[in-house]
Amino acid sequence: MAGLTAPLLGLQKKSLREQALSALRTAITSGELAPGRHLVETELSEMLQISRGTLREALRQLEQEGLLSAGPRGRLSVRHLDHKEIRDIFAVRAALESLAARTLCELADRQHVTESLHAAIDAMAANAGGTLEERIESDLEFHRTLCRLTGNETLLHSWESLEGSIRMSIMFAGQEKGVSNMSVDRHRDIVDAIDTGDAGLTRKTILEHMDTAAANLVS
Amino acid sequence: MAGLTAPLLGLQKKSLREQALSALRTAITSGELAPGRHLVETELSEMLQISRGTLREALRQLEQEGLLSAGPRGRLSVRHLDHKEIRDIFAVRAALESLAARTLCELADRQHVTESLHAAIDAMAANAGGTLEERIESDLEFHRTLCRLTGNETLLHSWESLEGSIRMSIMFAGQEKGVSNMSVDRHRDIVDAIDTGDAGLTRKTILEHMDTAAANLVS
DNA sequence: GAAACTACGACTGTAAACAGTCGACTTATG
DNA sequence: CATAAGTCGACTGTTTACAGTCGTAGTTTC
């Protein structure tokens, strides 16, 4: 009986605010809303077909995620990232993922971890020939999984707060360069390091991975 | 001529939203709004004498800072932290401040850094006999300064996003325990380590500091 | 023609009203 | 008495309307 009504398997219909949030995030990280662009509330609310009040709630969140920057008198514009900011973002990202990796090394039940990570890598391999967007997606999914598997909700939340900025960094740097670091092999190195349980080695692997990624982006 | 009108030295009058934000943050981290307490928008908006729309914008931000947790149907309540969550928060905090310390070690101009940190420590010493609130304040100010001096805005922002949770952790754990780690000496160790420029030593000092702090809180 | 002054327009800040939904309490019914 | 149906109240989700502020273009004045 239960289940016939179907659509309540966790996919509860999102509020307009959440829809707007997703739509705007996508628009920004895809470049549809270019960095530096001024956002006018009345304009956006009309585009998204929602009221300004609802929109403003979404804008606040985007602002705190670092995708928007506030000018004088509350004017919002899409954040523009220079090379230093990209390096800074990746430094923080490295610190977070380094913690994630170390935590995973010290975890009791590493069986499940290993399986999940290998699954994520397999997904990457499957997407290896896909579009740039698909590859970015599976790349981020891998790193997000890294954080999620620690069971540290705060860590996951912090990482996700940074995710928008990371996407912008990749976007901004132009598609040509950022690709090289998304190969499957480089990620397999990370998983292998975790498998050894050597926290020092794992940390080093992650930091190098991030350094390379950031260096590629700012070429 | 310019400057006579006076009050525009960066202290532009805050919007109602920001005022509400501060008021709520204080109310929560001070325990006035106890963990687990249900928040009713109409109630709060009346207390704060602001409209619900304005209030909701502030609530969104508090939610993302981890001070509020959302129940079914958007019901918000003050987040309750258990021991594991406190440890998790301090683990992330340690990762961030560890990055900060390492960055400071590698910084070219360490003169300014040293001066600022010593000033922060002096402030702590001056508050050593003050109330618990004052000591917590100068303690957090020291650690915030650590992040700010790196010049990494993303790092500072991430830390500040965590600040509310840190305050809640200290609050929650009860006033009796969390004090021991806020001595001036333990912070001087950190500054000394940075002064040596030894990134490894500094990292170790920070991690130990955080470990001790978290351990004290969850006793 | 340049400087001050005024009127308009474009936005954000804020408030108030409307709509929908879920739970609790009551009432009818077997 | 238990249970099902119905009603009321309390909230959140969302929209609409109003107020205030700054820039800008057009106009006046010397």
Image (cartoon, coloured by chain):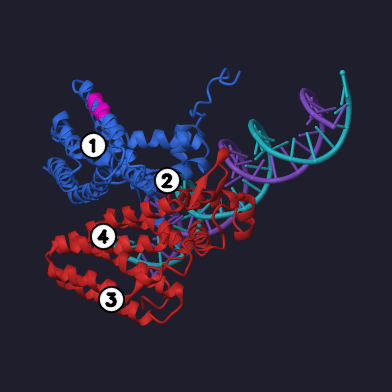
Chain colours: A red, B blue, C purple, D cyan
Q: Which residue is mark 2?
A: B61
The local crowd at label 4, few if under 14, some if 14 to 19, many if 20 or more residues have their Cα within 10 Å, is some
Numbered tag placed on residue A75 in the rendering: none
User: Residue B192's image quarter?
Assistant: top left
The local crowd at label 3, few if under 14, some if 14 to 19, many if 20 or more residues have their Cα within 10 Å, is few
Q: Is residue B155 left or right of residue A52?
A: left
Which stretch did the figure color magenta?
Answer: B118-123
For badge 4, the amino acid type reads Leu
Locate the N terminus of chain B and report the quarter of the image it occupies. Answer: top right
Spatial distance from mark 3 to mark 2, Cα to Cα?
39 Å
Whether labels 4 and 1 belong to a single chain: the reply is: no
Does residue B209 lie above or below A179 as drawn?
above
For badge 3, the amino acid type reads Asp
Whether labels 3 and 2 belong to a single chain: the reply is: no
Spatial distance from mark 4 to mark 1, Cα to Cα?
34 Å
Residue A115 drawn in magenta: no
> Is residue B31 shown to the viewer in this render?
no
Numbered tag placed on residue A185 in the rendering: 3
Do residues under tags 3 and 2 come within 8 Å of each other at their CB atoms?
A: no
Mark 4 vs 3, N-terminal side: 3
Q: Is residue B181 left or right of residue A189?
A: left
Q: Which residue is mark 1?
A: B171
x and y percentages locating residue C10 in the rendered image: 70, 46
Disc 3 element: helix
Q: Which residue is mark 4?
A: A207
Whether labels 4 and 2 belong to a single chain: the reply is: no
